[in-house]
Amino acid sequence: MSDDRFAILGGGIAGLSAAARLREHGLDVPVFEAKDRPGGLLDSFTLETAEGRWTFDNAVHLSFASEPEVRAVFDRTPYLSHEARSLNWDGGLWIPHPVQNNMFPLPAEEKADLIVDLSRHLAQVHADAPIATYRDWLLHQYGEKIAERWPLRYTRKYWTLDAGDLGIGWIGNRMRRADLREVVFGAVSDNPPNTYYVSTMRYPERGGYRAFLDPLLEAADIRCGLRAVEVDNRRNVVTFADGRSRPYRRMISTIPLPVLVALMTDVPDDIRRLADTLFATSIDIVSIGFRKPNVSPSLWFYIYDTDILASRAYSPSIKSAHNAPEGCSSLQFEIYSSRASGHGLAPDGLVESCIRAVEAMGLAGREEIALTHHKHLPFGNVVFDLGMEERRDVVRGWVESQDILLAGRFGEWDYLWSNQAFMSGRAAADALAQAAR
Ligand SMILES: Cc1cc2nc3c(=O)[nH]c(=O)nc-3n(C[C@H](O)[C@H](O)[C@H](O)COP(=O)(O)OP(=O)(O)OC[C@H]3O[C@@H](n4cnc5c(N)ncnc54)[C@H](O)[C@@H]3O)c2cc1C
């Protein structure tokens, strides 16, 4: 029987793992999901053409979960393992990732310039130099020439901001630190060691990334098609778009933090103002199916060229051959925008820009395309503009004083991978269960 005292908002992995953990605590708490099915960002979708059935995810999605709690769920779905190797497309060259450790394909003169600049920089760098922005961090790591050549350019495409406007709290192990020996080695050898921050990535054999969620869906009480449109935080009642409402004593919210605050009825002005400053990138994903195998040169790749809108692409058919009909292959491109900077293109224009990118990279001809598809994801990555974490923490602290626990990538408003979003939902469930005792 459902426990009337509690509710979970949002049926992505964080909401689903919170519900599963609450069941372990003996609490059956319903999950209210706006869409017509659960999964959130981890949902997958299928398309049919004369060639057969195609499966795509919502952006790249591979699992590198190490937490036993996550593995206990994900590993129940048969999966494939991939070596974490990717490429970069830059001005007509395919360069293995990370670029600064794989400069072999570059002209000798350019490599020499970049390495000399880095070594001069490393000789002068002061360990205690202040690093306030991502730009400072990049210059500190790589020196001016390498930073300008790649990451500063890429930042504008991926984060939609200049690196000088971004903080550094999100970097963690996502960026490889500069190591002169690694850089020199990769400039003289075409086969340097892979220095990506994880070695193996897992993906369901069938059914797209969503299949990893299947065990969480088994016993869950998920109520789909219920978009929360008001949270009366004085009376503790949530109202949905269809007019139904539900009282709660405590609630776990995994919906985007600024959206939640906008739905709340009784919010101090300063909290509302701070919540309004939080923003995320949106992602337009363009999926393309090809009537020929092996179109993509790697599992995923980054695109530096500024005349190509997409920042990144990956191949669903390399993730699993079951994602494309026999003899076919597929790509999906990610195009980022935000309130700071937009592309201003309609879906047709976005699809056309990706087809041109495929042609420019020499991957396939237009006549080999079996399908194109566009989808808009309103919430992609939380943007760490300067001071965001301080503002977010104030908002979070206030919301959590209102009988609402926050979980997930957008509930916590943090750069969480799917395994971290899972753990975040679980932690919120533990806190709720403890308070319920
Ligand atoms: C481009 C990109 C690539 C990624 N790649 C990887 C990867 O390779 N590996 C990895 O582990 N992770 C990856 N991630 C991260 C992963 O997608 C997230 O960590 C995870 O999906 C977040 O789950 P969540 O439940 O926190 O949020 P969501 O999945 O967003 O779930 C929130 C749910 O709330 C619902 N909702 C919103 N508003 C309302 C409302 N008003 N009422 C009711 N419901 C509502 C939404 O419909 C949604 O279902 C990637 C993310 C992005 C953007």
Image (cartoon, rainbow, N blue to C red):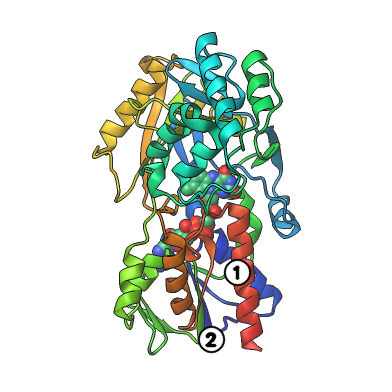
Residue at image location 57% in from the left, 81% down from the top: 2
Residue at image location 71% in from the left, 25% down from the top: 193
For disc 1, does the CB lie below 8 Å from ligand 1?
no
Inspect this view and state whether residue 241 appears: no
Disc number for residue 206 = none
Residue 61 position within the rendered picture, expressed as x and y whole percent measured from the top left: 56, 43
Circle 1 packing at 10 Å, graded few (<14), some (14-19), many (20+), is many
Residue 362 position within the rendered picture, expressed as x and y whole percent measured from the top left: 44, 14
Q: Which residue is mark 2?
A: 5
Residue 322 position within the rendered picture, expressed as x and y whole percent measured from the top left: 60, 33
Three-letter code for the amino acid on which mark 2 is drawn:
Arg
Q: Which residue is mark 1?
A: 18
Callout 1: SS: helix
- Foreground: 362 or 86? 86
Quadrant location of residue 28? Answer: bottom right
Q: Is residue 279 above or below residue 18?
A: above
Of the two numbered discs 1 and 2 on the same chain, state the one appearing first in sequence. Answer: 2
Residue 139 position within the rendered picture, expressed as x and y whole percent measured from the top left: 49, 37
